[in-house]
Image (tube, grey):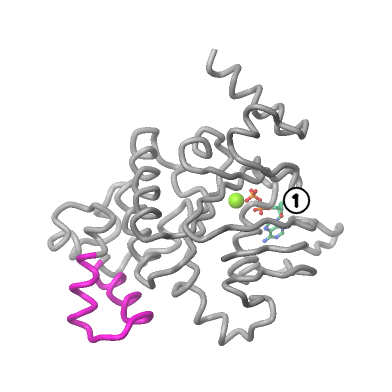
Amino acid sequence: MLEVKNLSTYFSKDDGLIKAVDNVSFSVGRGDILGILGESGSGKSTIAHAILRLVPPPGRIVRGEIIFNGTNLLQLSESEMIKIRGAKIAMVFQDPFTFLNPVFTVGEQIAEAIQLHQSGGKKEAWTKAIAMLETVQIHNAAQRIHDYPHQFSGGMRQRVMLAMALSGKPDLLLADEPTTALDVTVQSEILKLIKDLQTRLNLSVIYITHNFGIIKTLCQRVIVMHKGNLVEEGTVVQIVESPKDEYTRNLVNCLRALKR
Ligand code: ADP
Ligand code: MG
């Protein structure tokens, strides 16, 4: 359903060119969860931004194809791309506050997102918003829908962000380190929820993290990024058992050392 071919995205700075993503190719099938693993600055977020065509200046997609359900997104006009964002491909990230508006209740925000992407009136959107909160397993959804983002805990805010992201019924969810700021227990609850949603909604997911443990719990396949290059690709089992790349070997060895 998604095929990224020879994607290169560079940032031109006064002091030179940063090759944030350089000639990267991978694919994601319907209902698959692909992990993107790599340390900070390796180009993971830039891949996600490129897929949505939201690379901030001075960044630029300089080469490649992003084929989504048979269409090269890089050839669409901006108005065609707007119809893809949120409705077909949605994104969640580490900080829900960049996504949620503090002055509106979560109900108002989810209902607005629903009205943007689906037909039906305000009342219907409101009912669907409550159902969305239930989908992401927020208890007392009918009451909590009147709360503001700051009235939710960190983990609950991530659930609200997921509810908003899923309100356009996307086929593909880009998750950029959504659990990094959470403590371990809450993190594993959110991972469980993402896995559950992926199965129930037959979602394709790209899960971005620097944490190999998360990749192991969540993904079957993984690509490893290092300094803008894709250095390894395979199933999680393959990569743990026989990492080909030196960088990945070090990652796996570190993980083993931690377990001892
Ligand atoms: P990751 O998500 O793996 O931490 P990023 O994709 O954010 O990595 O960054 C990859 C590279 O691109 C880094 O060298 C980073 O400094 C650079 N980069 C990312 N965003 C910008 C930006 N807005 N302006 C300049 N350079 C950027
Ligand atoms: Mg990032």
User: Residue 127: within the magenta?
Assistant: yes
Residue at the limit of the structure toward the top, as seen here: 260
Q: Quadrant of the C terminus?
A: top right
Residue at the limit of the structure toward the right, as seen here: 16
The disc labelled 1 sits on which kind of residue? Gly
Q: Residue at x 74, y 48 (%)?
A: 230
Determine which quarter of the picture holds residue 120.
bottom left
Under circle 1, the secondary element is loop
Q: Residue at x 37, y 81 (%)?
A: 116
Q: Quadrant of ligand 1?
A: bottom right
- In the image, which residues are magenta? 107-131
Residue 11 on image: x %, y %: 77, 62
Cβ(mark 1) to ligand 1 < 8 Å? yes
Side of 7 relative to 71 (left or right): right
Look at the picture and state if 87 lies above or below 220: below
Look at the picture and state if 199 lies above or below 124: above
Residue 108 on image: x %, y %: 26, 73
Q: Name the dominant secondary structure of the magenta segment.
A: helix
Q: Residue at x 64, y 76 (%)?
A: 73
Look at the picture and state if 68 lies above or below 82: above
Badge 1 is on which residue?
228
Determine which quarter of the picture holds residue 119.
bottom left
